[in-house]
Image (spheres, coloured by chain):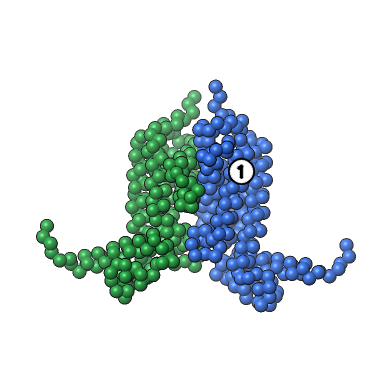
Chain colours: A blue, B green
Amino acid sequence: MTSTPLSRSEAKDLTRRKLIRAALAILDEEGEAGLSTVKVARAAGIAQSSFYVHFKDMQELLRVLAEEGGERLRSSMREARRRARESPGDLGLHRETFRIPLESICRHPELLRIQIRARHDPSSSLRDFASETAAAYREHHAADLAALGYTADNERDRRRLDMIADGINAATNALAMGHLEGRYPDLDEAADILTALSRGALRLLRSTSGATRPGDEPPARP
Amino acid sequence: MTSTPLSRSEAKDLTRRKLIRAALAILDEEGEAGLSTVKVARAAGIAQSSFYVHFKDMQELLRVLAEEGGERLRSSMREARRRARESPGDLGLHRETFRIPLESICRHPELLRIQIRARHDPSSSLRDFASETAAAYREHHAADLAALGYTADNERDRRRLDMIADGINAATNALAMGHLEGRYPDLDEAADILTALSRGALRLLRSTSGATRPGDEPPARP
């Protein structure tokens, strides 16, 4: 490849990425309190006024940051669940479906905190975004549970899958926060608890819907 | 009883209660955005300046409000868990242990929202209070699980009970929020999901610790 200079749009994209990386580094080191357009621009090596060429405000930068991270995380969670589905007897693969989100949250807890606050703040400009994000995790998780063989062909079954996904996602966030607070030092232990919570709920579906699932735990057979 | 006039401290206490009730009514009708010392004082029928005789600021009023409500709720949850423990085969009693917090959250969702936001906001003055509140729910729940017969005599077992309690409490909050958002219209369905999540996790404890529990689901016997 010849080393041609960056095009205008490539250069713009590069600066945008630098700003996102700078914001993430500041979030990591100082938390949100340290986050200002001045600091982020300085860390990215551009003038503060140029910040606004790329983002309307800091909230928009955070939204983009969370969106990109969220998409990556959701797709690796789905991939892990697919692998676990294909080898239902492998507990390690099952645990992995929970280790992935736990580790991701612990790497950048600020991102989850920002979203949780926005989701529970009627006056937040990020509230819709936070609700949509929560819905994306819930819907993907519920669809993956359905793919495990649990019927989702009536309203009640769909609602139950949604509730299980919702509950498990909330529990995942809570255990990650507990890890960060030093209460649960071992993420594998936390992943095991999440696996157990999830299996308990799925057992309920198995026993009260028409679903059959020749999975890792044998269903009752006549 | 003779109708003696209120003593000075009784009158003060009455005004304090009026302020708390007024704040709660405004929270219910207008959400936090409508909450100001002017409005709360007016609704309680006192001068705005008198507000500060009773509370340092609106945050303190909210803290007192959440504290009182939280203590009442925690004690009715413990009482419901005690009843469920005494009749382990009664699924209705078990469901009740989850209906109680679900209904309580749905009655005053603002209180939970305020606490969740504070808990995830490093700059919030209510953060310590929110952490302590979450710890109180978790510890009571974990103690009640231990009372079910699950051993908690080593660090790992205690941690696992804490994680289950933590996860279930977070799931309870998430399902209550989903009910408020119209996604889960039937609180009994939500309570059944929480029961199933909880049983799944307890089954893990039963299978991997020395605990024996002749409960509603027979443990495996040789």
**Residue B219 horizontal/vertical position (percent):** 47, 30
The residue under the point 35% across, 56% down is: B69
**Residue A190 horizontal/vertical position (percent):** 55, 47
- Give the camera-side residue of B3 and A105: B3
Depicted A104 relative to depicted A56: above or below: above
The residue under the point 35% across, 61% down is: B25
Residue A178 in sight here = yes
Q: Considering the numbered disc 1 on the image, is that residue within a helix, a strand or a loop? A: helix
- Give the camera-side residue of B57 and A123: A123
Identity, as a three-letter code, of the amino acid under mark 1: Ala
| In the displayed structure image, the side of residue A11 where residue B109 appears, left or right | left
**Residue A86 horizontal/vertical position (percent):** 67, 37
The residue under the point 62% across, 37% down is: A148
Depicted B93 relative to depicted B14: above or below: above
Residue B153 in sight here = no
Query: Badge 1: how crowded within 10 Å, few (<14), some, or many (20+)?
Result: some
Depicted B12 relative to depicted A201: above or below: below
**Residue A15 horizontal/vertical position (percent):** 72, 69
The chain to which mark 1 is attached is A
- Give the camera-side residue of B124 and B163: B124
The residue under the point 60% across, 32% down is: A213
Q: Return the residue at label 1.
A: A143
